[in-house]
Amino acid sequence: MSDYMFHDWSMGRGGSLLNTDNTHLTQIHGHLLRHGLEQLNLLLSHLISACSSLNQTHYAHLIFQQTHHPNILLFNSIIKSFSLSPPSSHSSLLIFSDMKRRRICPDEFTFPPLLKSCSNICDTRLGQCVHGEVVRGGYEWFGSIRVGILEMYVTFGRIRDAEKVFDDMSERDVIVWNLMINGFCKMGDVETGLRLFRRMGERNVVSWNTMISCLAQSGRDGEALEVFNEMREEGFEPDEATVVSVLPACGRLGDVEVGKWVHCYADSKGLIGEVVSVGNALVSFYCKCGYLDAACSVFRGMARKNVVSWNTLISGYAFNGRGELGIDLFEEMINADEKPNAATFVGGLTCCVHVGLVEKGRDLFALMTETHGIEPQLEHYGCMVDVLGRSGCLKEAHDLIKSMPMKPNAALWGALLGACSTHGEVKLAELAAKELIDVEPWNSGNYVLLSNIYAEEGRWDEVEKVRELMKENCITKAPGQSAIGKS
């Protein structure tokens, strides 16, 4: 078979190499080797592209290394291959250095994947070096390269550099506008992002999703819903990303009407069955609005679930005062051989707190480490201290705090102090209050709590010491706080 015949076969009757699979990949490579075609750059560039599409970057590199005289076409193919595999992106730059050493000139197809690699590894210095190569080579006017430079600077968080590239563009497509909007919003400048959004002559679904998501994440839920309503009025069809972005805003605002519309829409488009994150977002929305039956109905109707699905409903039951249902669901999860994570146990323990299930809390805390190998974090210890404290097991709660491998935070000592106050355990309350002051010496409320503990015991000398300590630490009592004084 001649070189051209094989090329026709590989790209025609045999089907595009990009549509092959791993088995055919090795067969085609073997065919090249058997027929002495393993040094043909054109064929090898197609083979390397096929490797990339199958995530076989290592195999692509082996093919490249066995080539005696790679040309610009082959170099571009292997550089692109590495850029598509973020863990290997640094190799793109090493290949580019090798290319320069061989005095092979880059072209307009060399730089977009190089810039993408710089974005992947988030190396500002290397990115600026590649940008310099672009300018020296006169390639900065190619559209795909300018977009690559813009995306790179947005990824680096260098929004002013990105803005300069943006301002120098005579033509800006919707991708470029979306990049800039996202860049400003990522830096916390949502207002500028919104102004750019309003200036856009043409928008796509990504434009709307970006703006809705950024507004919602910055706490501007009302505006997020306004933009969502505009999107619908202008005839754009929401996709799964829209649904996942807008539902949390609905939940925080308690906007059940819009949330239910989104639910009906997602159901009509089959998104709940196809996209797990959509089902999870709906469960979370209904839990936040207190519609637990609806949340459970969505959960039960999901064809596929992940650990987030289970965690969301378990936590939803906990925070709506239905901890017993949360515990039942936790046990159903374990019985179904679903693997829990650290967040699952936070949800389960929170259920125990709200229902007062001390023994179950102890069991879950032990199960976490002994069966699932999950080391307790501050949140887990906090839940356990809370459940023990509320049940009057104050010494056990204190012993648990002392056994922690990390330093207890204010929330833990606060939970113990609250429990001690409820159960009249003055000595331990005094200790907890002192620890609170040690953790948060700037918080005037902690001093007031300790002062009130002493005042209730009639220990006025200690009350005076606390006041002196506040003066020494330049702590001013916040308005509305009251320290009991001697009458």
Image: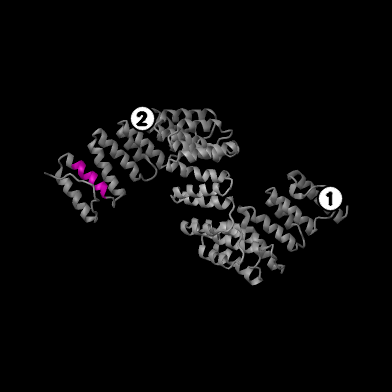
Give x and y (percent) for residue 216: 47, 49
Give x and y (percent) for residue 332: 50, 28
Which residue position is annotated with label 2?
Answer: 356
Q: In front here: 290 or 69?
A: 290
Labelled disc at residue 9: 1
Give x and y (percent) for residue 226: 48, 49
Residue shown at the point (86%, 53%) measured from the top left = 5
Labelled disc at residue 29: none
- Residue 234 placement, left or right of 411: right
Outermost residue toward the left in this view? 487
| Residue 88 can be seen, yes or no | yes
Amino acid tagged 2: Gly
Name above or below for residue 354 compared with residue 436. above
Q: For the C terminus, which image quadrant? A: top left
Amino acid tagged 1: Trp
Neighbor class of circle 1 (other Cα within 10 Å; few <14, some 14-19, many 20+) is some
Residue 139: which quarter of the image?
bottom right
- Residue 425 placement, left or right of 214: left
Residue 70: which quarter of the image?
bottom right
How does the figure colour the protein chain or chains? one colour
Outermost residue toward the right in this view? 1
Helix, strand or loop at label 1? It is helix
Instruction: Read off the magenta span.
Output: 444-454
- Overall secondary structure of the magenta section: helix
